[in-house]
Image (cartoon, grey):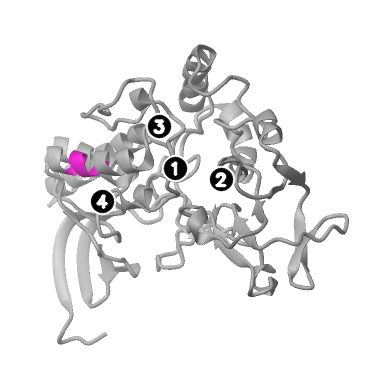
Amino acid sequence: MNGERERKDRVETVIIGGGQAGLSVGYHLTKRGREFLILDANERIGDSWRKRWDSLRVFTPARADGLAGLPFPAPPWSFPTKDEIGDYFEAYVERFQLPVETEVRVDGISKEEDRYVVACGDRRIEADNVVVATGACRNPKVPMFAPELDPRIVQLHSSEYRSSSQLLAGDVLLVGAGNSGAEIARELSPTRTTWLAGKEPGHIPARHGSIPFRVLFRVIRFIGTHILTMGTPIGRKARPKFVSHGTPLIRVRPKDLAAAGIKRVGKITGIKEGKPLVEGGQVLDVANVIWCTGFRSDFSWIQLPVFDPAGEPEQVRGVVAKEPGLYFVGLLFLYAATSDVLPGVGRDAEYIANHIDSRMVTAGAGA
């Protein structure tokens, strides 16, 4: 780094990530009169949603999609589009005048004496507190053997898929039978032979948006928010399985996939002669592969000793005891089963904002 060009800033709290987690923390810090700055790598706030596939609608009803202080502007039991979510986030920033800088990519977090240093290219931001709100879906995950596919086959991760216009004519294979794989498979099935590989993760036993679904949604939300938490024995027991397995199918059910003519196969175990190989030996002659294989955490850019052997942050309710002033929010099952989604992230954000406020009040009293 060129020392002469280096730019230094100072702020009480830096929030990295301008999605629902980061904005929620910002709102609660604003309510407490604390100074902070939100950094987001996207061109616009909300782009993390806008960049997903074109037909995507959120799985939770609008009544549960609003962040603290601003209800979502849609009929309560409607399901907003991904662009409507993005626009809502922009409106949220404007409504509460949250200090946000976009197109700022954070390269690292380190510590010098008692202050954190957030590195963004040739810029350094010093802070008393840092909140990592980059979310659970940061780095696409694909199998190690993906590069062995014939280069003539179009392959995309689900995070890169927008519409069928990206694909070649011919069959398509979706690897991963969770919600992304099932939804994209149903979208593509009317125009081409569609294969869906992987084990079904279970499904919600009510038609999405129906009256029974509304009742079931309330029950599931209550359980995911108040029962399946790190504060209950059942929640602590369920967490490892919850984290390692995909969520049940929400909008698309197995019989919907069958009715659409989608062909089901087992696990893709490798590549044979440039083509996907199914367990049992079947080789699929497809023109396109979409990896709906989820995401992996990557905190290698945080240069602090706060991670367990699996690379996950050692935290309690987002608070890192080893490094006072460092926080995480928006991660899968951070505290509860709903911690990473719109209906549940606000509680964690408020807890962390309260912790920051108390920490800074104490620091001020001892100064």
Disc nearer the start of the sequence (3/1): 1
Would you say the residues marked 3 and 1 are in contact, meaning their CB atoms lie under 8 Å apart? Answer: no
Is residue 297 visible from the viewing direction of this image?
A: no
Binning the other alpha carbons within 10 Å of mark 4 as few (below 14), some (14 to 19) or many (20 upward) gives many
Residue labelled with disc 3? 344
Number of the label disc, if any, that sits on residue 55: 1
Question: Any mark on residue 184, and which?
Answer: 2
User: In the rendered image of this protein, does residue 238 appear above or below residue 169?
Assistant: above
Residue contact between numbered discs 3 and 4, judged by CB atoms under 8 Å: no
Quote the CA–CA distance across marks 3 and 1. Answer: 24 Å
Q: Earlier in the sequence, mark 4 or mark 1?
A: 4
Range of residues picked out in magenta: 89-93
Residue 227 lies, in percent from the top left, at 52, 23
- Give the left or right position of residue 30, taking residue 112 as reference: left
Dot label at residue 45: 4
Give the image quarter of residue 97.
Answer: top left
Kindly report which numbered mark, 3 or 2, lies closer to the viewer in this rendering: 2
Kind of residue at badge 4? Ile
Mark closer to the observer (4, 1)? 1
